[in-house]
Image (cartoon, rainbow, N blue to C red):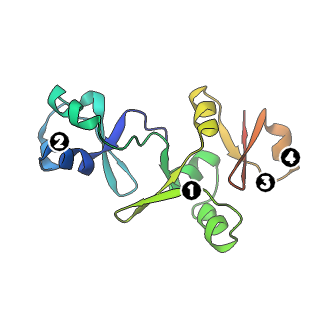
Amino acid sequence: MLRKGFVFTRELAKNAGVSTANFHQIGEVELSKMGGISIVRVESLPQKYKEFAKSCTNIEKYTTMSDLEKDLGMYKDSLYYHMITKNNVQIPYIKIERSIFLILPDEFLELKERGMIPFQIKDEEDEKEADLIIDMHGLRVGFY
């Protein structure tokens, strides 16, 4: 889920004044998807594009709703249900084209970087399993 060192392909192409197809034609470039949006690893780019990548959005803090649900062991669409229907989880997000990206808090990213495993806290049993618990905008997340 952590996408350190990636940028949005379309944003990079716009900054460089080229088509996104250019990056598909360069053999060593590492492309991936985040939601419905193409992303590219900056380190895999030829040097001339790395300069353009410096002015692109840092997507390290962004994730899709489905990726966060998987990471926390939640059922598909359950986070959407909590955010929209119950209105008890208010994770900040940005919308790019047709995709919504949640903005992860620094504390969550730091714990993941240290190798800790996150999961959703649903009850007292889950609380007992957690080595550490954080509140992520109304969503209780445990780590072990």
Q: Nearer the viewer, mark 2 or mark 4?
A: 2
Q: CA distance from mark 1 to mark 2?
A: 30 Å
Numbered circle sitting on residue 122: 3
| Front position in the image: 70 or 29 | 29
Q: Could you say whether the residue bearing mark 2 is in a helix, strand or loop?
A: helix
Tell me where residue 116 sits by quadrant.
top right
Q: Distance between the Cα atoms at labels 2 and 4?
A: 48 Å
Q: Position of residue 67 (x, y in %)?
A: 51, 50
* Circle nearer the N terminus (4, 1): 1
Q: Residue at x 58, y 64 (%)?
A: 77
**Tag in front: 4 or 1:** 1
Report the residue marked by disc 1: 92
- Which residue appears at 13% of the width and 36% of the height? 26
* Type of amino acid under label 1: Pro
**Along the viewing direction, whichever of 8 and 124 lies nearer the viewer:** 8
Determine the residue positioned at 57% across, 61% down.
76
Image quadrant assignment for residue 91: bottom right
Q: Position of residue 32 (x, y in %)?
A: 32, 44
Which residue is painted at 29% across and 32% down in the image? 42
Q: Between tags 1 and 3, which lies in front? A: 1
Q: Earlier in the sequence, mark 1 or mark 3?
A: 1
Q: Which numbered disc, 2 or 3, marks the residue closer to the eye?
A: 2
Disc on the earlier residue, 2 or 4: 2
Q: Earlier in the sequence, mark 1 or mark 2?
A: 2
Residue type marked 3? Lys
Q: SS for tag 1?
A: loop
Specify whether 143 is left or right of 58: right
Q: Please, what is the three-letter code of the amino acid marked with disc 4? A: Glu
23 relative to 120 in the view: left or right: left
Q: Tell me the number on the disc at residue 23.
A: 2
Q: Tell me whether the residue at label 2 lies in contact with that at label 4, contact meaning CB atoms closer than 8 angstroms.
A: no
Residue 123 percent across, percent down from the top left = 84, 52
